[in-house]
Amino acid sequence: MWMKFQSVLRPSNAAVAVIGLLAVFVSGSLLAETGLQWRIEADRLEVYGIEIDRTSASHRMTDHKSGHALHFHVEGLHHSLIGPAGEVVLSCSSTHWSECRTASVLWQRPNGMSQSGQLRLRDAELTLDLQPMHAVWALGAAVPTLKIKEFPVAWLANDSAWLQELIGLSGSVDLDLRLGEPDWRFSGGLSALSFDTSDGQVAAAELGLDFKGHWYPLERDVDLVLHWDQGEALFGPLYIPPPELPFELHLKTNLSAADQPLAAKIELAQSDQLRLQAAIQWPSHNDIAIQNLAASIQVQAMQLASMWRQGLESLAESYGLAGLQPAGNVQAQVQIHAGQVQQAKLQFENVQIDDERERIRLENVNGALDLRTDIGALELDLSWQDALLMGLDLGPSELMLDSNESGVIELVNPPFRQPLLDGHLVVHQLQWIDWLSETPSFVLHAELEPIQLASVSRAFGWPLLGGELSGYLPGMHYNQGVLEFDGGISASIFSGALQISNLAVERPFGPLPALAADIEFSQFDLFELTGAFDFGSMQGRLNGYMRDLRLLDWQPVAFDAWLATDPETSDKRRISQQAIDSISSLSGAGGAVLSNTVLRVFEDFPYANVGLGCTLSEGICQMRGLNEQENGGYLIVEGRGLPHLDIIGYQRRVNWTRLLNQIQSATRGGVSIGQPGSN
């Protein structure tokens, strides 16, 4: 006997759904009393997102001992969220169909793997065991209840499209589901969830989540509360370590059709460390991308120290800001449209930033930022008690910026005065033009009020230098991690002038910062310069340059440098024996030139000119002097009068690291020296 039903069942409630799903099996079981062999098939069953392509039941008589053999077969099992789930076969053998309370189960998964177990009916409870999973369905209860323990999430691997890219998927799920009207209530937990992706951009290890909530099947609404207290995760550059305190997430959303808008309300809290509320929306379930996001976010409280350790630190490291240690509280209101921030209001309370690499430090920062990108407006009012930037101590100050009617950001109540060491940086004009474009420009008029070089020396660990540093800063541009300066930066140092041009800094606060510049200097007082080091003493004026300078991680890797006596000055030109020895050790001339007993009588010598150059490339310094000598050397110091003394160098190619060590050895100590004698 064979029967087939062509129908689609769409039950209106869970109880009817169960009845519809078992109708074929029950009716077939009644026919078993007749002793006939039969097969019944039904096409298409749909129950709240669960679809079955074909359902069949069959019966055959075995020998007189075994009695009846019943089979129930579900093919093409599919769910709208997880995709295809394979097919299920129930088999039971007994002497009478009514005694068939235990059936063997075979689940054939789409990936070719299978699970086997038992299905038992006892005291109105339907129990399914598929090791290690254990499920109980309380059929006789007023509210049907399904309890599942230790369902392995690995069983879902390759069974659904969105899980196919996960590698090493493991962990288990516990679920307590109560099928009521109008909602289904659920609770449970996710234990030891671990996975990875082939590109390593998304991963999790030993995640533990507890959840509870409501599912409204007719409206497809979800009201979910998640509690996270263990495990770690990675999402691209964002690494989330195990929580110091439990996080709780409250989510309300609607899982309507794919072409309908997707909206959700979120509340996120971690004790008193974080309180956040957000409303987010995408135009449809098929367009979940950042560029389509609309959101309203309110941060009532965020303790920076805790949140920094909880994930913000990894984002900062991806931008080259590793080692920062912020503290304090931040409040924020943010509006996002089409994936872009349109409005943002931030309030800073007692914020502090420390840096283990001592690039930056801020203490007791207070103030507010009001940003409106939709109309090109910005207002900033920040004050700080103390600060440090690249090793330079900054004192207390307050910075106020506002945008004008043209959308240009500029100083409020200029000038802005920032203490810097024992001087000041004074900004008379600051304008940030086209600040929302990819190529913003700056108009900057600032000056550096005199700073004692001794203060700069102590800040950077240099030998103690005398004199003052002052200068003027021209226009500045910052784009895609590169800081460029228009014109040049001028400064007064060693009673002379210093001019820096073509200055550009890449990744100033990031990994491997790089600097490019050309430096020209003139009229340096050699006595002041050499007096800062234990190098020996020289008198005269010095000109020179360092062109095509390139620093990587603040260390020179390339330049063309030249130092020479200024031919236009008539200052006394004398050089001490110690300076002669120092120059000789750098150039390979040797100290034997002063071994003559007569020369040893003199403490210093007159000279006509000095010239020494170095072109650095690939770690080697190519040396040169005033002119080439017939013996293969190059003239560094040209003597004058009596006693006449020339210094000739012979080392052409010098290892840069070795040369630095020689310079440090020659200048170590910062010993103060007296004025050389006159001639």
Image (cartoon, rainbow, N blue to C red):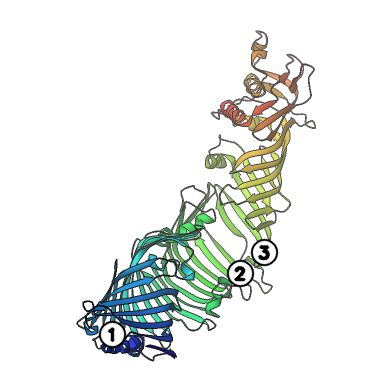
Q: Quadrant of residue 188?
A: bottom left
**Circle 3 or circle 2, nearest the eye:** 3
Q: Where is residue 176 shown, x and y percent of the image?
A: 29, 77
**Image: 389 above or below 664:** below
Name the amino acid type tagged 1.
Pro
Tag 3 near tag 1, CB within 8 Å: no
Q: Where is residue 623 shown, x and y percent of the image?
A: 71, 28
Name the amino acid type tagged 2.
Asp
User: In the rendered structure, which disc, 1 or 2, sits on the residue that comes first in sequence?
Assistant: 1
The answer for how far apart the CA atoms under marks 3 and 1 are is 60 Å
Image point (73%, 16%), residue name: 645
Q: Where is residue 18 shown, x and y percent of the image?
A: 33, 86
**Image: 334 above or below 641:** below
Q: Is residue 275 visible?
A: yes
**Circle 3 or circle 1, nearest the eye:** 1
Q: Read off the residue under disc 1.
A: 144
The quadrant of the picture occupied by the C terminus is top right
Residue 30 vs residue 374: left or right? left
**Circle 1 or circle 2, nearest the eye:** 1
Q: Read off the residue under disc 3.
A: 438
The answer for how far apart the CA atoms under marks 1 and 2 are is 63 Å
Residue 17 vs residue 349: left or right? left
Report crowding for label 1: few under 14, some 14 to 19, many 20 or more residues within 10 A (C-alpha).
Answer: some
The quadrant of the picture occupied by the N terminus is bottom left
User: In the rendered structure, which disc, 3 or 1, sits on the residue that comes first in sequence?
Assistant: 1
Q: Quadrant of residue 584?
A: top right
Q: Where is residue 431 shown, x and y percent of the image?
A: 67, 63
Comparing 41 with 150, the one in front is 41
